[in-house]
Amino acid sequence: MPRHRIVFAVLASAAALLLAAAAPGAAQAQSTFRSALLGEPPHIDPQRMADFGSYTVTSQIYSTLTILDDKLQIVPYAAKSWTVSPDGLTWTFKLRDNLVFHNGRKADANDVKYSLSRLASPDSRSPSSFLLLSDVVGFEAVNKQGEKELSGIRVVDPLTVEIKLQSPPKGDLATRLSHISMAIICKEAVEAGGQNWAETQPIGTGPWKLKEWAHRSKVVYDAFPQFFEGKPKVDRLEMPIVPEAATQLAMYQNGELDVVLVPLGDYPRLKADPRFSKEMKVWDRAQVQFLALNPRVYAPFKDVRVRQAFAQAIDKQKVINQVFHGLYIPANGMLPPGIPGFDPGLKALPYDPARAKQLLAEAGFPDGKGLPPLTMTVNPVTGDYRMMTEPIAAMLKDTLGVNIEVQLQEFASFTAAMNRRDALASFMTGWSASTLDAAYFHELWLYSKSPLNRVNYESAAFDKLIDQANAAPDKARRIGFIKQADELITKDVPLIPVMYTRFVYLISPKVKGLEQVPLSLGFNTFRAVEVAR
C-alpha cells in the first residue's frame, strides 16, 4: 500500500474514534440505581393504591401537592406554597410554574381539579377517596350523584387552586394531600388509556418516567429531564421483582442491588460482619403487624370472647425475642409510634393462657372442642409475616386447641383475596403509613363504611369515635378521640396487633441522597439519589 494511503487510513480511524467519543452517552456510562420490589405490584394506578408495592412504583411517576420530608414535616412539592383561611375551611395552593407532564404538556390548576374530582368519582375505583376527600365541598355529589367535578375546588388562575372544606374539616388537608392517591394525573392519558390507563399511559409530573413494566420481572424508569426540582442525579431507576428475601440479599452481596431490606434471620450474622455492619442502617417504621380475624368467614370470631382468647394466647414478647432478635416492640394498639394519637400508656390484653382457655370455654369451646379448623393466610410480601405466623399458630394450637393450617399465596392473589373480604378466615399482615395520619389505620381498616374494612368490623361505638375525631374542632380533642378508638380496638379485638417494626437495610456506600422516612418501604421518592460506580 502507498505510504500516503496508510497515513490517510490511520487519520480516518483516529477521526472515527474521536467522533464516537463525542457521541451522546459515549463519554460517560449511564448511571443506574437498583432497588428490588418484594412482589409483583397489583397495579400502578395511584388513585387505587392500597399496598406499598404499588406505592413505591407509582410515587416515582407522579407528584402530589405536598410531601413528607426526611424531618417528618409536610412541605410543598408540586405546590410551592399554600395559605389557610382563619376558619380552616379554605385552602389556597400556589403551584410551581415549571410543572410538566411526561408528555411535555405543562400542568396547571385545571389538572389538580380534574385529578381530585376523578379520585372522588366511582370511576377511580379508589378505596381511599372517602378517607381523603369526603370533607371537600361537593364530594357526595360526585361520589354518589353522578356530578363530574368537585364544586369545592376552584381554579383561581392557571397557577392557583382553591379547595373549600365542609365544616368541621376532617383533620389536616396538607397531610392528606401528600398521599399518592391525591397525585396530579393527566386527563388525556386517562381518556386514551381507558380502565387500564395507568399501565398503558403512565404519564405524571414526577421525577421518573416509566420505561418498562415487565410483569413479574422488573420495573424500569428513565430520569425525567423536565422534573420541576431538576432532573434526577442518576439516569435510570431499576426495580427487579424478587419475592425471595434471600435472593435479594445475594444480589446485594454480588453488587446487583444498591440497597436491600435485611432478612431478619440474617441480621445477627450481618451485624457481626466487618463490612456489612458498616452498611447497615436501622430506623423506626410507622408500621404495625397483626393477625386479622374475619367473622364473615370464620363464625366463631363473631364472639368477642373467642377473639379475646386468641389475643391472650399469644406471647408477643417471646415471638419478638426468639424470632426477631428483640428488634421490634410489642404492639398494644393499632397505631404505631410516630402517628399522632399513638398512646404509649395504652394497655393491651395481657398474655394469659389460663384466661384465654377460660374465655374460650365460656364461648362454648372448652379446650378448643367444636372449633372448626382455621386457615391462617400469610402476606408473602416480606419474610416477617411467615416468621411470626409459625410460632403464633403453635401458641394458639397449644393453648386453645385450635387446628391451624398456614397458607401461603403469591402477593397479587393474597391482596385480591384480602380485598374480597369474604375469602380469608384469618391472615397475618401489617399496615405501613403512607401519611402520618391515624385515619389511615383506624378509618381505612375498621370503619364500618370503609371498602378496606377487610375484617368486616362493625361497631357503632368505634364509628362514633371516628366521626367525633373527624369533627373535632382542634388537634387536642381529635387526638383524644383517636386514643379512645385505639383503646376500644384492644378490648374488642377485630384484629390482634402483634408488633411495631423497624427498618433494617443494607445501603451501599456508593449511594448518597436516599431520604429515610418511617412511611411505606422506608424511603421517599428516589429523586435525590446518587450512585458512584
Image (cartoon, rainbow, N blue to C red):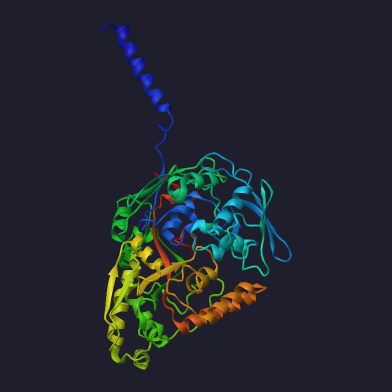
The answer to whether one can see residue 68 in this image is: no
Q: Position of residue 308 (x, y in %)?
A: 40, 85
Q: Position of residue 158 (x, y in %)?
A: 67, 45
Quarter the C terminus occupies: top left
Q: Quick check: 195 above or below 518?
A: above
Q: Judge by depth and name the residue closer to the eye, 171 or 37.
A: 171
Q: Is 21 displayed left or right of 107 in the figure? A: left
Q: Judge by depth and name the residue closer to the eye, 450 or 385.
A: 450
Return the residue found at the far top. 2
In which image quadrant can residue 497 be found? bottom left
Q: Position of residue 347 (x, y in %)?
A: 48, 84
Q: Which residue is painted at 28% across and 80% down in the image? A: 373
Return the residue found at the far front. 145
Q: Quick check: 22 above or below 497?
A: above
Q: Position of residue 402 (x, y in %)?
A: 29, 83
Q: Quick check: 464 above or below 415?
A: below
Q: Which residue is painted at 32% across and 52% down in the image? A: 216
